[in-house]
Image (cartoon, rainbow, N blue to C red):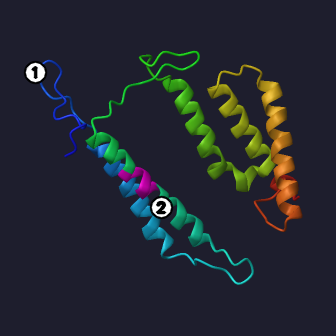
Amino acid sequence: MPSNWPQSDTAGGGAAAPRPWWLGGLVIALGCVCLYGAFSLPQAARYAGVGPGLFVTLVGSGLVLLGLLLLMQIARGEKFVPQDTEDASGSDKADMTAFLTALAAAIVPVLTIEALGVPFTAMLSFTLVARAFGSRKTVIDLITGAILGSLAWLLFTQLGLQIGSFLPLAGI
């Protein structure tokens, strides 16, 4: 071990502080799962030259590399402490209501895109995310989400990609 690495995590002869080895292992495991899934996807496609497996392979490789770098930092004794942000203290508890609202925004498209269409789904998801970030202007958030969802649907349609119906209830 190099001489500049700490020999012990003890503070004044006390017990060694626990090191989060599991965190680096978790990142590496997630990268390995991505790599395992990438092998079942084509790495190249005839029409584009780049297949879907290439991007999953790059993400998986990046996660494995970042996990290894994280393990190196842990081995050097890097301390992982919450940092203060612009308007919050690192010791503040997480806002579970905001977290669950953002989680609901991620689940909404899975449940509603086929039944409601892209604009309504985007409208709901955008409004939930805005609410999670503290917005209380629900009507403006709904309108903004509908506009963004409509523009996304239009642009994807112009590219020849189908991301869902515009308004399935109206038959569009």
Q: Which residue is mark 2?
A: 60
Kindly identify the residue that appears in the image at 24 percent across and 38 percent down: 5
Q: Which type of secondary structure does the marked residue at label 1 adopt? A: loop
Q: Is residue 94 magenta?
A: no
- Main SS class of the magenta portion in the image: helix
Q: Is residue 64 magenta?
A: yes
Q: Which type of secondary structure does the marked residue at label 2 adopt? A: helix
Kindly identify the residue that appears in the image at 27 percent across and 35 percent down: 77
Q: Tell me which segment is drawn in magenta.
A: 63-68
Q: In the rendering, at what x and y percent does residue 80 appear?
A: 36, 30
Kindly identify the residue that appears in the image at 67 percent across and 80 percent down: 45
**Residue 33 image label:** none
66, 36: nearer the viewer: 66
| Amino acid type for the residue under numbered disc 1 | Gly
Q: Residue furthest bottom?
A: 46
Q: Residue 82 appears in which quarter of the rendering?
A: top left
Quadrant including the C terminus? bottom right
In this image, 41 relative to 147: left or right?
left
Kindly identify the residue that appears in the image at 64 percent across and 74 percent down: 51
In this image, 114 relative to 52: left or right?
right
15, 13: nearer the viewer: 13
| Amino acid type for the residue under numbered disc 2 | Gly
- The 10 Å Cα crowd at callout 2, few under 14, some 14 to 19, many 20 or more, is many
Q: In the rendering, at what x and y percent does residue 142 appear?
A: 80, 32
Q: Which residue is mark 1?
A: 13
